[in-house]
Image (spheres, rainbow, N blue to C red):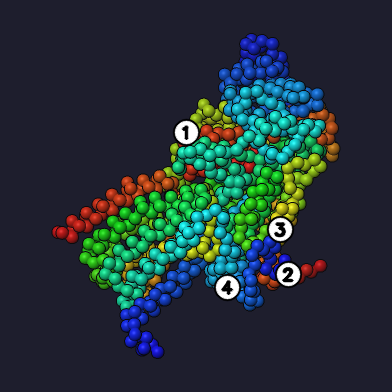
Amino acid sequence: MMNEIIQIVGKETVRVVIGLIGVLILVVVNALMLTWLERKISGHIQRRIGPKEVGPFGLIQPIADGLKLLGKEILTPSNVDKPLYFLAPVLIFIPVLVSFIVIPFDVCLQVKDINVGILVILAFSSLSVLSILLAGWGSNNKYSLIGALRSVAQNIAYEIPLLLSILPVIFMTNSLSLKDIVEVQREGWFIWKWQFFAFLIYFIAGVAETNRTPFDLPEAESELVAGFHTEYSGMRFALFFLAEYTNIMIISAVATVFFLGGYLGPFLPGFVWFFIKTYLLVAVIMWFRWTFPRVRFDQLLNFSWKILIPAAFINLIVTGGLLKL
Amino acid sequence: MGKGGFYLETKGPIIKFAIAEKFINLARANSIWPMTFGLACCAIEMMAAAMARFDIARFGAEVFRPSPRQADLMIINGTVTKKMAPTIVTLFEQMPSPKWVIAMGNCAISGGPFVFEGQYNIIEGIDKLIPVDVYVPGCPPRPEGLLEALMKLEEKITGTRRFPIPEQKW
Amino acid sequence: MVKTVFDDIKNTLKGVEISETSYDERGYHLAIESQKANIINIVEFFDGKGFYLEDLCCVDYKDYLELVYFFNNHKELCRVKVALKVESDKPAAPTISRIYTIANWYEREIHEFFGVYFENHTNLTYLFLHDEIDCYPLRKDRVPVTEDDRRLLNSFKPEEYEDGFFINLGPQHPSTHGVLRVVVKMDGEYIVSAEPVLGYLHRMHEKMAENRSYLQFLPNPPRMDYLGALNYNLGHVTTVEKLCSITVPERAQYIRTITAELNRISSHLLWVGAFVADLGGLTPFLYTFQDREHILDILEGIAGSRLTYCYFRFGGLYNDVDDAFIDATKQFIKHLRGRFGMYEKLVTKNVIFINRVKGIGILEQDKVPKYGCSGPVIRSTGIPFDIRKTEPYAAYDRIGFEIPTGTIGDNLDRYMIRIREMEISLNIIEEAIEKLPSGPFKAEKVPKKLKPPKGDIYHTVESPRGELGVYIVSDETDTPYRMRWRVPSYSNLMTFPYLAKGELISDAIATLGSYDLVIPEIDR
């Protein structure tokens, strides 16, 4: 039966469909695992153990959370803007799924190697800003609106350093495709081939893009009750939650691909190295959350416009100059 | 009031599957998310229960959500005054079901030490306004009392108790 | 100072009856009887001399109501009591809120509890009570609320205006302030005006005091401020002891000092955690709670409870301390001294934290007497005012310690002062343990039914939040005629609308956190 299907649609389509299903499973499992990882890391930093009773080492905890959220009442407040309210959680999950299509997990483990791969990721991550705005506006709630507007300003401000810090690597590789970027790093990872500052700028901007502490003003718990997802309950809230964790994964994955060599490494198979490097960065991002207080909003924007963007520009110009010589 | 533990069910499921109910109740019991809601002295003991020494996170309940729409459990800790009562009822109604309420401390159970003849400002017990599932006496109760209340709530939801009660030796 | 004030009043204000009182018996130096005609002149005189309004309360003697004003000076102790009699049927008095800003709230409170109408007051709406109350609660007889009074009391409703919107901070607050609601008028992210709404935890302590005997009222003050419970207990107990002239043995004084300082440390530890948690750093909260658990264990061994201690009794303590307590305290002092370095690295030297608190919420020194601030708030502006030094109680006059002050009065100053106070408290405890004498821990022959002599007394102690004052009027029965609590958070909170104007909302929340408010003590 497989052969008949392949004959009808073509090998490539089947491969892409299988890849998409794999990516979907990966995204869901990964998001669940990251919630568990966050609670364990936060627990150990705070001198306690996190979830322990629910399964060995609390490993079944995320499944319990997920089932509980599935079983919650689907509550729609009466005065929300219904199309926007319903659209926002769906819209926030699409970019993360699409971004995973172009990430190379191993030499031959990539759903589709589009030759403008990084452009796809950047374009779709801008879309997630739109969904936050829809959530904030559609909730018809002052706190959600303030949180959403803060998030929009923050994301717009930090996308520019994100892009500018990736450009030097693209210059050095002469290609926008993620596979090529990893392949070029066989001679040496970009992080120690002149691009250390670009890595730092990218990492900071990436943390700001995902709305994590120290840049988590849109969900500032002590000021605005829960930010832009105040009015969401049950599975819709779970989608926001999962999208945030998957965003962290994407930022770390892109950082791995661009600066840390992707799936390259001795002895172990490629995708094991990829996941080790990515999860290391994810753990560092989680570590930030439990160490630093929040940056104030105008300090946040000042930091981006007055410090990060000029630094990224200087890095770009210096790289361009070095490449010419 | 069924084994699921909810009292005011606005729209129950049309078809119930026993096995699925059992698993979902197990999941609900192991992942109860309280709301950050502290009124008075007992709130400090609730915070102490969430801190490193008593660690409510072991049972999956450390995610304190500030918004009532995302929380399952409301712990009323502290005296309920007449000015605060409408707020509490609004918060309770905003929570999606299934939801539970723990009345922590003497003030939430029956007014506590502030009941005297001629009192004009407190409500003697929160169960005059919203349905309560577990009562924790004490002024303030120890954080272990709150953990035991969580165990009792889990027993109410699933029907079995997580840790056996140690046998009384007297 | 007392002599000069006495002479000045005699010379400048004619027709004012002033008399000197014994400070040891009454707690105040001068007593002035005033009339409605010259109360404003008297208040302006004190304002000119730099005095601050310590308290404004009302006592219902059934034929008349007496408004009692207490003035005091930060630089040198001179407490003056000004009494104004108003008629009990449709009482009215001139307002002093133009001169002292804090009187705005004191007069609102007196209006809703006693029915006294203050002429020219800008805002006589409900402060603590809800709108279904139909009588004035603290009056001795049942006096129903009149119709035009009800209209006046109910007129606080936040309205819409075009360029901004109203936001409610609380009463369900994700930070640990308790049930405080602040109605904030905003213009984008900036605050145009902030108005606190109180009364969500009004538990009728003052009314309960009139219905309970002195001994029965003992559990109530710890529940007013559950974080500094021993200091409230101490305030209550020392005031009654002063009124009844009970001498407390030396050992009890020293133990009171030790336990009150331990309580101060635990309150400040919780504040540090909550303050940084407000700013977004959730981890120090857990570390400070961990340290606090040590103190709670030590105090549980002698006092019996973890949070709302009721350890002091009239004449001494409930039970004596043993060697286990002394050893545990010494170990704890060593442990906490080692932890300060970690807090220094994690919080105080953190760039993000410094940027969030430096230069924010600056309170100027000349504004302080208008509000009557006390505690770390006033010490952050540079005025070294501490009740433990100006009016020593327990064993504080036999132990040497210094008072930390700040420079500009911003949030960072208040933070550093509280850290420094914790270190100083550790030194005080050490010295007190060394000097601890042996002997009885309770005075003998304290009657079970205390019947203090007729009269009134005002006594203050230094709670972790500031100056806590107790004013008791006794009529020789075993229940107080009136017990009034002057709480520090009340006057500190009054500066918040002034400081929050024009700030970003994040800064306003940081400032609110730096006051160390405990709402049940404001609402009493």
Depth check, mark 2 against mark 4: the one in front is 4
Please provide percent x and percent y for residue C435. Answer: 66, 40
Amino acid carrying mark 4 in the image: Gly
Q: Are marks 2 and 4 in contact (CB under 8 Å)?
A: no
Q: Answer above or below: position of C42 versus C421.
A: above
Depth check, mark 4 against mark 1: the one in front is 4
The disc placed on residue C408 is 1
Which residue is the site of mark 2?
A: B166
Depth check, mark 3 against mark 2: the one in front is 3
Left or right? Give the position of A95 relative to C216. left
Amino acid carrying mark 3 in the image: Pro
Which residue is the site of mark 4?
A: A55
Q: Image quarter for residue C105?
A: top right
Q: Are marks 4 and 3 in contact (CB under 8 Å)?
A: no
Left or right? Give the position of A149 relative to C42. left
Q: Image quarter for residue C523?
A: top right
Which chain contains the residue that carries disc 1?
C
Q: Secondary structure at mark 1?
A: loop
Q: Secondary structure at mark 3?
A: loop
Which chain contains the residue that carries disc 2?
B
The disc placed on residue B131 is 3
**Chain-order first, disc 3 or disc 2:** 3
Question: Which class describes the residues within 10 Å of circle 2: few (<14), some (14-19), or many (20+)?
Answer: few
Question: Which class describes the residues within 10 Å of circle 4: few (<14), some (14-19), or many (20+)?
Answer: few
Q: Is residue C315 visible?
A: no
Name the residue: 61% across, 67% down. Answer: B28
Amino acid carrying mark 2 in the image: Pro
